[in-house]
């Protein structure tokens, strides 16, 4: 297929540091090209990929994330390029959109079928948006938990978990004595709760991640006073080999989130190094973490501290292998290929790319009870 991969306009692909959506796009482009698809990545300047990269804006805008001006400008220029080529030999079969809202809202103005991946949670504003515009594209959720919060019209949407190339991550069987928290310095991500849990358990904590615009006050009030360079260390934003090393050196990754996390790529990144994850039972965390195998699901800081005393029960090699089978790149590529065929067929295009396995697209997980967390 000829696929137009539409990245958000703010951060280059691959991201120089923090950038979960950009990492997903990087892997999908590389994997789809390896499967002989023709992929064009529309992304900010300085992006690179095995796909053909096309930029339509003059600059990236990492300090203006979610500013509508840049998203609208980016999407409008990409749509114009796609329309100009729709009758020629280089016409695209599918547009795969990873932007926030603009592309889906305007997808009915585009003759090429559009697949829209949901990268964020459903708050009240998002619910209203998707009730109005979801019918304009083929929607893909990144977890069943995310889809559970979606409008009823989306409950039969496909679920494709975010991918990870486990070959890029090294198993570590000799971690240090500290634990790790990594993410944006946001209250919902819980760096202050990680500090409390680590302190109760008597273990050292390393904090990593950016302080983005608007997060400075929270960081100064709730996080910075606890940083002493010993029991609590802050190492800033990590990328590349530094991030792999940070995961591998940690005994566990702490995820004390208080929001509907749609997926949580940092959890699978940690597991790829054999590092177990201790997470609050929010959003997709119970879907990603398997109790006693890849970590523990807990309810609060006290249970998190208790679980830290049980890390020796986790086999780090088994943790990595279990996560690889569930969240490896090949599974995501299979899922998206099925979605593309479904989208093309739904738009009246011939099924010239293979058959759609109904067992994968639109599938739902059976309801299940969450296992008891340690200490209960």
Image (cartoon, helix red, strand yellow):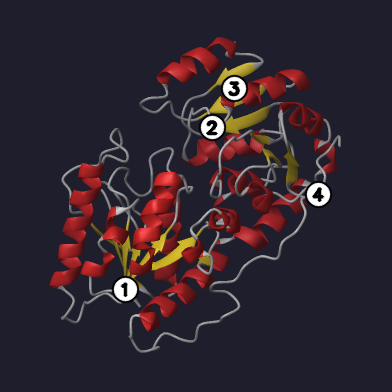
**Residue linked to disc 1:** 113
Mark 1 vs mark 4, CA separation in Å: 41 Å
Mark 1 vs mark 2, CA separation in Å: 35 Å
**Residue linked to disc 3:** 192
In the image shown, does 304 or 130 lie closer to the viewer? 130
Q: Residues within 10 Å of mark 1 (few under 14, many from 20)?
A: many
Numbered marks: total: 4
In the image shown, does 12 or 308 lie closer to the viewer? 308
Marks 3/4 in contact by CB < 8 Å: the verdict is no
Q: Residues within 10 Å of mark 4 (few under 14, many from 20)?
A: few
Q: Is residue 117 above or below residue 13?
A: below
Q: Residue at x 13, y 71 (%)?
A: 84
The secondary element bearing badge 3 is classed as helix
x and y percentages locating residue 289 in the rendered image: 69, 49
Return the disc, 3 or 1, that comes first in the chain's sequence: 1
**Residue linked to disc 2:** 188
Would residue 208 be seen by someone viewing this image from the given angle? Answer: yes
Return the disc, 1 or 4, that comes first in the chain's sequence: 1
Marks 2/4 in contact by CB < 8 Å: the verdict is no
Q: Which disc number belongs to residue 165?
A: none
Return the disc, 2 or 4, that comes first in the chain's sequence: 2
Looking at the image, is mark 2 or mark 3 nearer the viewer?
2
**Residue linked to disc 4:** 371
Return the disc, 1 or 2, that comes first in the chain's sequence: 1
Where is the C terminus found, in terms of image quarters? top right
């Amino acid at each position: 297929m000829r696929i137009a991969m539409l990245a958000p306009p703010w951060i280059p692909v691959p991201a120089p540091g923090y950038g979960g959506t950009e990492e997903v796009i990087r892997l999908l482009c590389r994997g789809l090209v390896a499967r002989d698809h023709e992929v064009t990545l529309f992304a900010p300047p300085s992006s690179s990929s095995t796909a053909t990269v096309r930029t339509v804006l003059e600059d990236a805008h990492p300090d203006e994330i979610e500013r509508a001006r840049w998203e609208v400008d980016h999407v409008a220029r990409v749509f114009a390029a796609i329309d100009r080529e729709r009758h020629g030999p280089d016409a695209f079969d599918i547009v795969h959109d990873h932007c926030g809202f603009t592309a889906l809202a305007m997808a009915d103005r585009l003759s090429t079928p559009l697949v829209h991946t949901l990268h964020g949670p459903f708050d009240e504003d998002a619910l209203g948006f998707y009730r109005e515009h979801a019918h304009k594209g083929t929607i893909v959720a990144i977890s069943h938990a995310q889809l559970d919060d979606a409008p009823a019209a989306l409950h039969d949407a496909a679920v494709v978990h975010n991918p990870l190339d486990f070959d890029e991550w090294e198993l570590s069987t000799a971690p240090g004595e500290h634990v790790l928290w990594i993410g944006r310095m946001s209250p919902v991500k819980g760096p202050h709760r990680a500090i409390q849990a680590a302190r109760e358990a008597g273990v050292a904590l390393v904090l990593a991640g950016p302080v983005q615009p608007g997060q400075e006050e929270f960081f100064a009030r709730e996080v910075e006073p606890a940083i002493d360079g010993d029991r609590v260390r802050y190492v800033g934003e990590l990328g590349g080999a530094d991030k792999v090393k940070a995961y591998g050196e940690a005994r566990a990754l702490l995820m004390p989130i208080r929001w509907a996390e749609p997926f949580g790529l940092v959890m699978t990144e940690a597991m790829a190094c054999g590092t177990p994850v201790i997470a609050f039972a929010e959003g997709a965390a119970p879907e990603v973490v398997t109790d006693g195998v890849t970590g523990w699901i807990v309810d609060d800081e006290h249970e998190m501290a208790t679980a830290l005393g049980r890390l020796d029960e986790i086999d780090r090699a088994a943790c990595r292998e279990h996560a690889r089978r569930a969240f490896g790149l090949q599974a995501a590529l299979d899922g998206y290929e099925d979605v593309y065929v479904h989208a093309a067929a739904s738009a009246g295009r011939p099924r010239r790319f293979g058959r759609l396995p109904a067992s994968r697209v639109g599938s739902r997980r059976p309801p299940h009870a969450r296992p008891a967390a340690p200490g209960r």
